[in-house]
Amino acid sequence: MKLSANRWAQWLVYGDHYSLQLENDGLLLESRHHRQYIPFSAWDGQLTISRGLLWGTISLTGFTEQGDAYPFDVFGLPWRRAKQAGKAIHARYQAYIARYQKQLALIRPSLLADYEALVNAPGYVRMAQLRTAQQTLLDTLESEGIPAAFLSQLDEGVATMLTPVLQGDIHWLKTRNQQWYAAMLNQWQTWFDQIESSPLNPAQREAVLTDESHTLVVAGPGSGKTSVLVARAAYLIESGQAKPEQLLLLAFGRDAATELKTRIKTKTGHEVNVTTFHGFARQQLAEHQGQAPIISSLASDETAKAAWLTQALAEQWQQPNTHKAWEKLHQQHALPIDDQAELSACAHESRLHSWVWSRLSRVIQANTTKRALTDKLASFEEQIGLKNELAVIWPLYQAYKQALKAENAVDFDGLIAKATKLFQQRKFATPIQFVMVDEYQDISPARLAMLEALCHGKTDSEILTPRASLYAVGDDWQAIYRFAGADVSLTTDFAQRFGDSEICWLTTCYRYPAALGDIAQQFICQNPKQLTKQLDYARDKASAKTPKAIKVITDDKLEKTLASLAKKHAKTTQPVTVMLIGRTHSRCPNDLETWQKTYPSLALRYTTAHASKGQEAHYVFILGMDEGVFPAKQRSLSLDVALLGKNEEPIEHAEERRLCYVALTRAQKQVWLVHQKGHASPFVEELKGNL
């Protein structure tokens, strides 16, 4: 059946539709310039016939694949025939609906079963699971030729139920998981109360239960992140979601790995693979390549490394071109050796070794061509000086690679690179399904590449279903290892990097009171690129009798303050812990051993700010808070820093600020900022303004 306007009407309506033809499964509209087909599956079955002075108009609404409404009008139609056409179209549409309702009835049980399987899945439902269920439903509908958008016309009840899954609705998924959380919190309440020495708080419990493909747990200082890691490993085993061999926990240091391993064994009675990144890489290479890689003495023995550097420098300086490049740097006072010293006599100098190794190690980490490094340096204003440094380091890099080859050995960077390549090839099945990482804020691009290869089998994280999930625990406010290759943006941009992700927040601090925490938080929150969070404190709020949480003294008052503190605690049965923290090892007081003997009521120890991470003490003294010391004076751009890439953080001393925050938050009770009289650092002045 076809209904068209007469020629005069067609001329009057010009560019609008003037013809309507009823096809088997839809309507064909025609205008002077184009034709538009509307399948019944993209129409709601409603049409309006309106009468004008001379003719009738049929109006209807079609829908795009995205469900957006699109109105159509056909003008200039004979009125009586338009009414007849409307009845015929309606009858054909009803027959079409009836036919597909019969087809839907055949697959309805399968559709509902797949939906129920997702909703009632025995655990947290990940975004990848939602996508899989979505595709399964779409495939089932497609097998009967039923578009998802047409489902509501066939069975409104089924459509209402399935639409969130068919549309991949993340909000619906979160609601489903919240209901599951509530059920699990009730079911496992006693377990959560007893798994650690103190009951886990609500945020910790939710973090333990969260099981997205990529989960970041942002854990403030003293918020119980280790408890969450231990409890999560125990929960996965106890709930039957994982066998011990399916878990992998990675830490950056052996001590942290040992602590986690011991605590999990104590809680569960099971051995779980808890190791360092390098330890895991070595395990896997040994298992899948038949033998463990040999670690070069240049990586594991400082004496051997120093001997090699001495020999390598001496050999390089025998090459005329290389010697000339070194002499150029020497004359520019760019080397840490005496200006009057003969270069050839300095090959054994430890300061020169440190200078060389800081740059050479960064080139080793880059693991790329000289051209690629040169291109990277070209983006810096200081590129000439940087390229001069690269000119002397590159021959040493080549010599270093030859030395490893001669040993048939690898260094630690090579270990990570080899393991990454192994996982990318995906030639073997791994039992690992749950990867957990402690101190994730210290992750480097190379280590993350290994994790992505392990979890996804390739570096690209855009994959439908990862073979292992990544559960990262850390705090970007405590990211202090950029100099070692860590990249804080891998934490702050976690959600952008991994599309399927969830972020949990541990914001209750159990270590120090609000009086200290509020000042420390105000200090660290000056950087807008960091993740925003508001910490709260389990300990009582400050009262009028509470001493100031942070005090400022000059270094000549340090011993007197220690004596006063020792007198205050002279009658305590156990020594109170006192941590002296300095920017570097050189800040350790010469009188430390004397003080340790003089004040037995104080358990005094010294550590650097970097080494203090993960520690705590009743009282903390941050030494050397002097201008140019803490924050450290910014030195001219060097090759090792340039190869880390441009620092995109919007405030000055961003990493030094985080380092100071780490030092501040080691204290359980009180902190003293110690500086030379008349030389207080900008950090001291800023903190004094908040006291």
Image: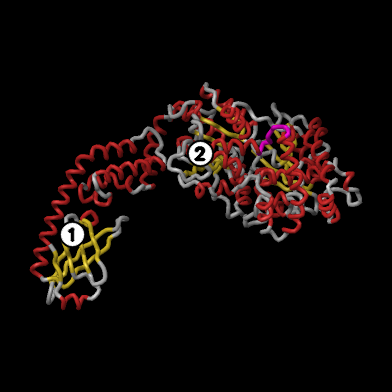
In the rendered view, does 113 fall on the left or right side of 50?
right
Q: Does residue 635 sit above or below 253 in this rendering?
A: below
Q: Verify whether residue 411 appears in magenta.
A: yes
Any mark on residue 46, and which?
A: 1
Residue 1 is situated, as x and y percent measured from the top left of the image, at 12, 62
In front here: 482 or 462? 462
Q: Secondary structure at mark 2?
A: loop
The magenta segment is 406-413
Dot 2 or dot 1, earlier in sequence: 1
Question: CB atoms at circles 2 and 1 under 8 Å apart?
Answer: no
Q: Secondary structure at mark 1?
A: strand
Residue 302 is situated, as x and y percent measured from the top left of the image, at 77, 34
Q: Crowding at label 2, few (<14), some or many (≥20) Cα neighbours within 10 Å?
A: many
Residue 177 is situated, as x and y percent measured from the top left of the image, at 39, 40
The kind of residue tagged 2 is Gly
The kind of residue tagged 1 is Gln
In the rendered view, does 548 fall on the left or right side of 493?
right
Q: Residue at position x 19%, y 68% from top?
A: 74
In front here: 7 or 507? 7
In the rendered view, does 90 fall on the left or right side of 240?
left
| Residue 689 visible somewhere in the drawing | yes
In the rendered view, does 20 fall on the left or right side of 149?
left
| Residue 543 visible somewhere in the drawing | no
- Residue occupied by mark 2: 457
Q: How many marks?
A: 2
Q: Verify whether residue 243 appears in magenta.
A: no
Any mark on residue 500, and which?
A: none
In front here: 413 or 572? 413
Q: Residue at position x 11%, y 71% from top?
A: 78
